[in-house]
Amino acid sequence: MRNIVCVVLAVPALLLAGNTQPMTTLPQEYAVEDAVPTKGSIAPNRTGQDPGCVIGVVDTIGGTTYDWQASGPALRMMVNSPDYGVHVLWMFSASDQTTFPDRNMRYNFYDYSARTWNWVDPDFMQSGVNVFTERVGFGSLDRDPITDVAVASCHHATGSLAPLVGRDMAPGAGIFEYCAGEPTLDNYAWPWVSVGMNGYYHLACIDYSTKNDLYWSRATTWCNWDQAVSIPPPQPQPNFPDHAITTSKATGSEKVCIAWEFAEGAPDPGFYRISTDGGTSWDNPVEVPWPSAYGGDTATSYHISSLFPYIDMNDRLHFAANVMPYVGGQGYVIPAQLWHWCEDNSPNWTHIVTATCDPQNLQAPVGYNALYACRQSMGEDQNNNLFIVWEQFDSVNVEPGPPELLRADIWWTHSSDNGQSWAEGEKITDGGAVSHRFPFILDNITDTVMVWYMIDQIAGFFIQGEGPATNNPIVVQKWENPYGAGVKEERQERLKIEACAVPNPFSRTTRISYAVPHSGDVSLVVYDIAGRPVRSLVSGRSEPGRFTVVWDRRSDTGKKMAAGVYLYKLVLGTKRVTGKLILTD
C-alpha cells in the first residue's frame, strides 16, 4: 500500500519500483458508528512562519525546502538530555532544484543553562548547523546515554548508498565526528539509529539492492559495525522503508525493538522483533495483532506510517499505531483510527481517537502517503505519564493548488495509567494557510512538553511533485507538562560540567556560561581552528556553581581577532567540554 489516493484524485507514485494500490474515502455504508466527526475550521490567513499555535509558545529553530521529512512512520528527531538540553535534527536544503545538491541533516540544541537555542538566525533558513560535510539525507536522531551527546544517522552515496553516523563531541557542541558504514554496510539505506543504555549503537536499514529487505547492525564500540543481520522468513519483508527501531530507556536494560509493516499485504500486517541482550541474540519476529477498529465487512489494515515502537523507563514495550479501513480488497484514508498497544496492559490495545468526517464534506485529497490521521510519536515524563502527538487533516482547509490538497494540524493526547485510558485529543495548531507536518514529541519530558514539526508553506510535497519549493520553518512548540514534573529544581541542583556561548554566531562579544559541579582547578581557553590557544578566559580554583565570562574579539593589545571558527575548552580535573564559536565580521 505504497500509494494513497483520497476521493478520486491520484497522487504521484513512489520513486521506488513496485505495485501501488489506490485509496479512497470509505463509502457511507461502511461508516463506523462510533466515529466522531472532526470539526473543520480555518483561522485567518497567515503569512511567513507563524504557525498559529493554540497552546504554549513556538520557537523557530531552522528551515528547509526539503519538505518530505520521512517516508514511513514518525522518525525520532528530538531527544532530551535532562542535565544539558534538547537535541533536534531535521533534513535540510535551501535549494529549489529537484536534485537538492545541498541536502544535509541539520542540528540545533536547546541549552537548559542558557535557556536558549545555540544556533538561531534572523533568517530561519540559516539557523542550525550541518551535521555532515557531504550531501546526505534520510536520517534520524538519538543520544548516547553515557555521554549525553547527539547521535545522527543518514545515508550517503558511495557508488551505491551506505549509512553514515555522526556523533557530537560534547552535549550541544555541534562539532561532529563521523563513522561510515562501508564496507561492512555498503549498499544499505534509510538507516534509523537508536543507542542503548549500554552505549551500543544500533541501525535498522533497508537493503538498497532490493529496496525491500530489512536489516540490522550494531557497533558495540564506536565505528566497529557488525555484519548486517536480516529479518528471517517466513515473515514478509517491509518492501518499503516503513521500519522503526527503539532501545529501552530503563537503567541496565539492553532491550532493542525493530518494527515494520508489510507494504504489499491485503490488508497490511505489522511485525516486530525483540532482543533483550543488546542484539547478541534475537527472538523470532512476532506479528502485531490488529486492534478491533472496524466491524462487519470492514477489515483493519496497518499503513506505511503505522507502527511507532517505544520502550519506556520501566522496560515495557509500547506501540502507537494508526490503522485504516479495508473493504473488498481496497484501503481507505478515512476514517483513520489511532490506537495504543502495551504488552503489560489487558487488553493490550486501547483506542485513542477516530479521525473522520462525512465523505461528502471531504473537500480535497490528503496527498502523498498519508491517512486522515497518522505519523504519531510517543514520549513519557519522569512519572511515567505517556504522551502522543500526530498530524491530522482538516476536511475544509484546502490548499488551492494545483493540486488542491488538505492542510494538516498537529494534535496531542496523554495518559496517566500506562495508556489504559487517554485524554480527549487536543489540537495544538489552529489551521491557517499553512500545513503542519511530521510531528515528533520529546522522548523524555520533564517540566515542559515539546513538539517538533515542520510548517509546510504550501500543502503538498515539492519533492513528490505536489507543489513548488518553499522555505518551510522547523519549529518546536512548548508548554507546561499538565502532570507537573517535580524535577526542574532537581535538574538545576544536579550540576554537570557544561558550557554554552550566547550569542553564537557573534560579531563583537559573546558570553560563555559554564557550570562547575564540584570544587577544583578550572580552565576555560579559546583556541583557533588549528588548535592554537588565543585567549585564556578562566584559570584557577573554583567552587561549584554557574558562572559567566565574556570573550571580546579584541585582544589585550586592541587587535581584532579574524572572523572564523574558534573552539573553547572548559577543563575541570580530568573532565572537559568543548564548544564551537563562530565569529563574524
Image: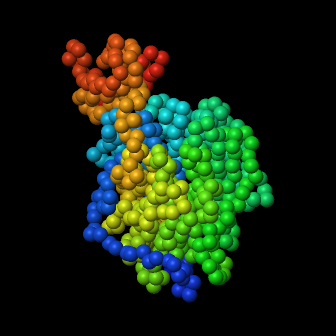
Q: Position of residue 31 (x, y in %)?
A: 54, 82
Q: Position of residue 466 (x, y in %)?
A: 46, 67
Which residue is located at x 58 percent, y 46 percent?
314
Rendering quarter of residue 437? bottom left
Rendering quarter of residue 195? top right
| Residue 298 in view | yes
* Badge count: 0
Given residues 552 and 236, the one toward you in this image is 236
- Residue 428, placed above or below residue 273: below
- Residue 532, placed above or below residue 277: above
Given residues 413 and 58, the one toward you in this image is 413
Which residue is located at x 45 percent, y 33 percent?
171
Q: Position of residue 144 (x, y in %)?
A: 54, 36
Which residue is located at x 28 percent, y 26 percent?
548
Given residues 109 and 299, the one toward you in this image is 299
Pick the quarter of the image with the C terminus.
top left
Is 550 left, or right, of 90 in this rendering?
Answer: left
Which residue is located at x 58 percent, y 38 percent?
251
Q: Position of residue 313 (x, y in %)?
A: 55, 45
Is 33 left, or right, of 64 in this rendering?
Answer: right
Given residues 576 and 164, the one toward you in this image is 576
| Residue 154 in view | no
Pick the quarter of the image with the N terminus.
bottom right
